[in-house]
Image (cartoon, helix red, strand yellow):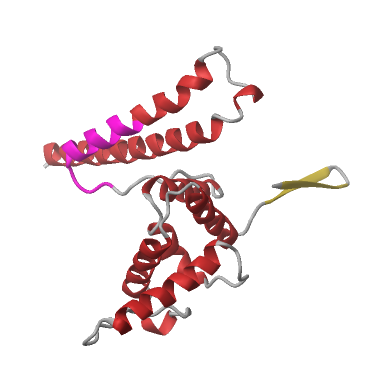
Amino acid sequence: MTELSHSKGVSAMSIVFHASRKDLVRSIARDAFNAGDLNLMNYADRIQELYFTLIPPASQDTNLRQPCDDATGERFEADRRHNRQIVERWVKGRVAEFPDDLEEPWVMALPDQWRDKALTELSARYGLLPAPIPSGGHTAAWTGDIMQSMADVLRDFAPIAEDGVINHLDADDLPAFILSSAKAMGILSSMQRQASEALQEAERRKAR
């Protein structure tokens, strides 16, 4: 990321350059692959499933194929291998083009922790957190989510807290903590919104 300051008269403007959205999501998939968390065949299968489910036919702009069954299954496997080859080229940066309509399936097909990372980094560009949409009163699910997210925060914060301060010496541990804390804040934000909506509904009922 590069920052450019430009002054004209008494006013100044700072411009921060960062990777494009497509380069960001591709680099996250590449990191997941290099970490051994992403199986290319499974990833390609999930991408094509989401792609042909989410993207209207008139907007589809990739060479991905929907695997078709035949008597021997050869066509089905050939289509899967075709998709894997295309996805591998995108993941490893062997081709520059990356269709805009692929971003959503690409991100949603990532393994959980890498999907969270992508959503957090994409949202952060607008000063936002990736808060899940409330699904209506399922407290058991929310309890499990928040307990797990807080456990992740404490785990990631433990090595940072060892010396009692947060500074440049914690550089290796900070990215994981930033990611887990952002996810926890997003979940809490959604829970707070749901609670606020429930309270407003209770007040409306009292006023009737």
Query: Which residue is depicted at the point 25% across and 41% down?
Result: 197
Residue 167 appears anywhere in the view: yes
Residue 93 image offset from top left, x and y in percent: 60, 64
Left or right: residue 126 compared with residue 81: right
Left or right: residue 34 compared with residue 38: right
- Frontmost residue, 144 versus 196: 144
Question: Hey, which residue is sitting farthest bottom in the picture?
Answer: 71
* Residue 113 painted magenta: no
Left or right: residue 15 compared with residue 19: right
Query: Which residue is depicted at the point 17% across and 36% down?
Result: 140
- Frontmost residue, 39 versus 200: 39
Measured along the vertical axis of the image, is residue 136 above or below residue 174?
below
Residue 50 image offset from top left, x and y in percent: 34, 68
Residue 101 appears anywhere in the view: no
Residue 161 image offset from top left, x and y in percent: 51, 17
Residue 63 image offset from top left, x and y in percent: 47, 80
Left or right: residue 116 compared with residue 9: left
* Residue 139 painted magenta: yes
Which region is colored magenta? Answer: 134-149
Question: Hey, which residue is sitting farthest right in the picture?
Answer: 9
